[in-house]
Amino acid sequence: MSLASAEAETETVAAERSHLHSSPARAERLLARFHQLRNFTDALCAGLEPEDCVVQSMPDVSPTKWHLAHTTWFFETFILKKFVPGYRPEIPEYAYLFNSYYNAAGDIHRRDLRGLISRPTVREAQRYRASIDSHIENLLSAADEKLLDEIEPILVLGRHHEQQHQELLITDIKHVFAQNPLYPVFRSGRARHSVRAEERTATECRPYDFIEFEETPVTIGHDGHGFAYDNEGPRHQALIPAFSLASRPITNGEYIAFIEDNGYRRPELWLSLGWMTVNEQCWQAPLYWAKRDGAWWHFTLSGFRPVDEAEPVTHVSYFEADAYANWAGARLPTEFEWERAALDCPIDGNFVEDELFHPAPTAVASAVSAEKTAQDEDLHQLFGDVWEWTRSAYSPYPGYRAAPGALGEYNGKFMCNQYVLRGGSCATARSHIRRTYRNFFQPEKRWQFTGIRLARDPE
Ligand SMILES: [Fe+2]
């Protein structure tokens, strides 16, 4: 992410702070948000035992302990080491152990070996967090305006970085728990947003529509107000031909129809690489699904339970999303079509703060939504619930250049062999997502809360 875009967030309050606030007030505000972020990470781990926090169930998954330490390493490396004169890390080896992929920041411990590291212990990792938090507090409390100007953009980036890891922490512990025949429960869920049965049934039974959009030039990318990652810019014009977009994501019930129509055994529906993957991995259903006595069940963060046909399908790869779209006589949207549709939609939905930790049926998601507009009648669940695969390859926008230095490695170097996903999920923080937000994963990945929304060309 470019520091320039992070700085934009500071610009929005520049006048306010220079005239109305002294440094202590500004530092206090920054620290309040910092502690809120760190506390939320801790709250996510509240029900976990130390034994849960050290397992790496596959190379893509990191142990909870690693997430706790790595997010801390970020603040230590990019703020304390840079801005505290003579700063000496208590344990210099952490720089190697908890660097994820920043080559410019030094050597890196192998990602697939994170589960082999029993020391530091979980308690020591928590102590590391507390120690760095206290250093950050001391630094900010004593900083003048000029220093805060330098620190704030990186602090803001560190906050968004940790929010990304909060989501990974959730999806990773789900994968860890799914390996366990005892099917541990992360959260019992579902309590906060109950919807009357008749209301729910009425909404669930409604088939999806296709909402039409006319051809139009659209300004794509972030407008510079508030924080954005560098991959959301430069802002540029794109001509988007006429298209239509499904009114809601594909449900489990609709996806079961694809399975039962032999969707996983019909090569004509699949990309070549997808067909190879289906056969190599013996896929017959989304990740975490299993058939018991003729019915589909799946593992959720609330335990192993029957599949609810009204929920958006999740834990499908790009390959599965694309095959489903072919089967349904449709296609996946481009990221530009998605962004154009999102321009009219409030950023609202089932996010991590709702603590469902699972996609919700349309009726439940609507109950979660605080804000309602006329557009709610058209497009449902564009934000939250499931990340929506687009058919757009993750590549740089025209004029994109990664920033120099270690932080320039944040996004740009991953622009190869991945697809863009939009909208956030039930594990994404509400304050983290934007209409222009570009998530990205390789097409075979399934362990994130990834789902399907269809698009069509004009007839
Ligand atoms: Fe990271």
Image (cartoon, rainbow, N blue to C red):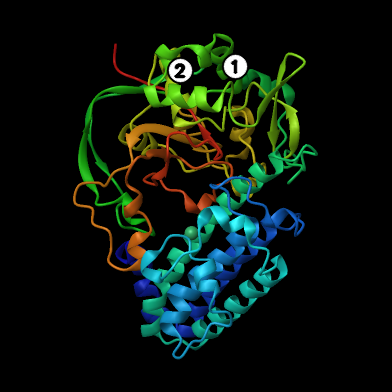
Dot 1 amino acid type:
Ile
Pointer 2 local density, CA inside 10 Å: few below 14, some 14–19, many at least 20: few
Figure quadrant of residue 295 = top right
Mark 2 CB within 8 Å of ligand 1: no
Frontmost of labels 1 and 2 is 1
Q: What residue would you read off at disc 1?
A: 256
Give the farthest residue toward the top: 261
Q: Which mark is residue 209?
A: 2
In the rendered structure, the answer to whether residue 216 lies left or right of residue 127 reads: left
Using the image, determine if residue 5 lies above or below residue 437: below
Q: Nearer the viewer, residue 186 or 144?
A: 186
Dot 2 amino acid type:
Asp
Figure quadrant of residue 97 = bottom right
- Residue positioned 35% across, 38% down in the render: 339
The image position of residue 340, as x and y in percent, is 32, 35
Using the image, determine if residue 118 lies above or below residue 152: above
The image position of residue 288, as x and y in percent, is 64, 31
Mark before the other along the chain sequence, 1 or 2 = 2
Q: Are marks 1 and 2 in contact (CB under 8 Å)?
A: no
Provide the secondary structure element on which disc 1 rests: helix
The image position of residue 173, as x and y in percent, is 66, 48
- Residue positioned 64% across, 61% down in the render: 65
Quadrant for the C terminus in the image: top left
Figure quadrant of residue 349 = top right
The image position of residue 89, as x and y in percent, is 53, 82
Give the farthest residue toward the right: 182
- Residue positioned 37% across, 80% down in the render: 18
